[in-house]
Amino acid sequence: MLLEKIEGLLKEVSNLSAQKAEDVEQLRLKYLSKKGEINALMADFRQVPKDQKKEIGMKINELKQLAMEKINSLREEVAEEAVSSDDMDLTRTPYPIALGTRHPLTIVRNQIIDIFSRMGFTLFQGPEVDDDKHVFTMLNFAADHPARDMQDTFFIEQSDPGDVTKNVLLRSHTSGDEAHFMENHQPPFRILCPGRVYRNEAISARAHCFFHQVEGLYVDKGVSFTDLKQVLLTFAREMFGPDTKIRLRPSYFPFTEPSAEMDISCNICGGKGCGFCKHTGWVEILGCGMVDPHDLEACGIDSSVYTGYAFGMGVERITNLKYRVDDLRMFSENDKRFLEEFKSAY
Ligand code: DAH
């Protein structure tokens, strides 16, 4: 009887299985604890006749040994399973794959670069921490020119208040890159300078203390305003669609003569007039003009031989027109819900 019972338990124990650590613990309690099945056999064992004690005793030991080994190996099994199946299934397809998206300003900047690259412009980037000399003086701003205040420049160091050329500042426009490039190169050249600029403005939906511009400059023999117009028309149509019209309004910048501001036909109403374009049918997108001979000479370029044009546009402005982002603060708040809306090949 007892022998049969032990044989039965041996079979049972060798077939044990478990899914979780709790199951293993249940089995340990069932077979190996003080009140467990194997200990219970000891009570029966006392009744066993002497001549069978050896045989049955060995069987009980065998059972105990097997139960211990089995439960230990089950414990290892479920521990391995917990790691491989729950936490680290290496066979599983890793989706949804959270691909990052480019910032809308990067997308638009890259688009601008792409369009002008196809027209022969190469990239040049000057410093963000610059000096008065390159940002203003070489660009024909007089020492007392109000533009320095007008643009609300952040000055970092004014080592010699009497000499504006010594002042260190955060550049307030990318036009300074024109001076940086021209003082080290002779024409012909055609450059595009994207970058961040800073102005001491209170942050609001319509103004920010930093934003982005792209500057363009082309200097060669015989460059005319007609060239400028055609390049800007091509840009506007590539950027905003083939039906886009442009118009140039006379304006003033110290570093260009003549100067103009360029409008495009409102890309929301198609030029008919709407709230966005204040019912004019036009929206302004950039400033431009013929490089003032003063700037060429200040950089050692012979203005009797060479002429050039320049233009500068705000990346936020173009992005606003393209994607209708009305509040400038959105660009620097890093709200993932906003950023994830922009998917692009650029
Ligand atoms: N630098 C001007 C600004 O920040 C924009 C600009 C106007 C750039 C005319 C130019 C230009 O190159 O020719 O408002």
Image: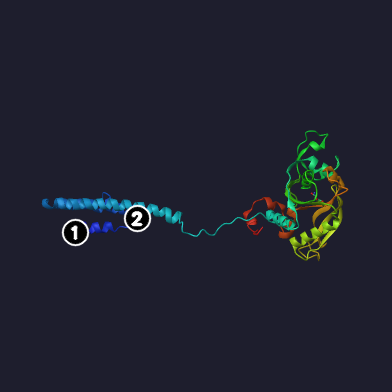
Marks 1 and 2, the one that precedes in the sequence:
1
Q: Residue 121 carries which label?
A: none
Foreground residue among 298 and 149: 298
Residue beneath label 1, please?
Answer: 4
Q: Can you see residue 27?
A: yes
In the picture of the structure, the residue carrying the numbered disc 2 is 23
Callout 2 amino acid: Asp
Give the camera-side residue of 133 and 11: 133
Quadrant containing the C terminus in the rendered view: bottom right
Picture quadrant where residue 295 is located: top right
Instruction: Quote the CA–CA distance across marks 1 and 2.
Output: 26 Å
Residue 2 place in picture, x, y as percent: 17, 56
Q: Quadrant of the N terminus?
A: bottom left
Mark 1: is the Cβ under 8 angstroms from ligand 1? no
Using residue 107 as the reference point, say whether residue 53 is left or right of it.
left
In the rendered structure, the answer to whether residue 309 lies left or right of residue 336 reads right
Give x and y (percent) for residue 292: 86, 48
Closer to us: 246 or 230: 230
Q: Position of residue 226 (x, y in %)?
A: 85, 58
For mark 2, does the 10 Å Cα neighbourhood hold few (<14), some (14 to 19), or many (20 or more) residues? some
Mark 1 element type: helix
Coloring scheme of the render?
rainbow
Q: For this view, does 150 lie left or right of residue 71?
A: right
Q: Which residue is drawn at 81% across and 37% down?
A: 165
- Amino acid of disc 1: Glu
Q: Is residue 203 visible?
A: no
Mark 1 surroundings: few (<14), some (14-19) or many (≥20) residues within 10 A:
few
Q: Where is residue 134 in the image (x, y as percent from the top left)?
A: 79, 42
State the SS at label 2.
helix
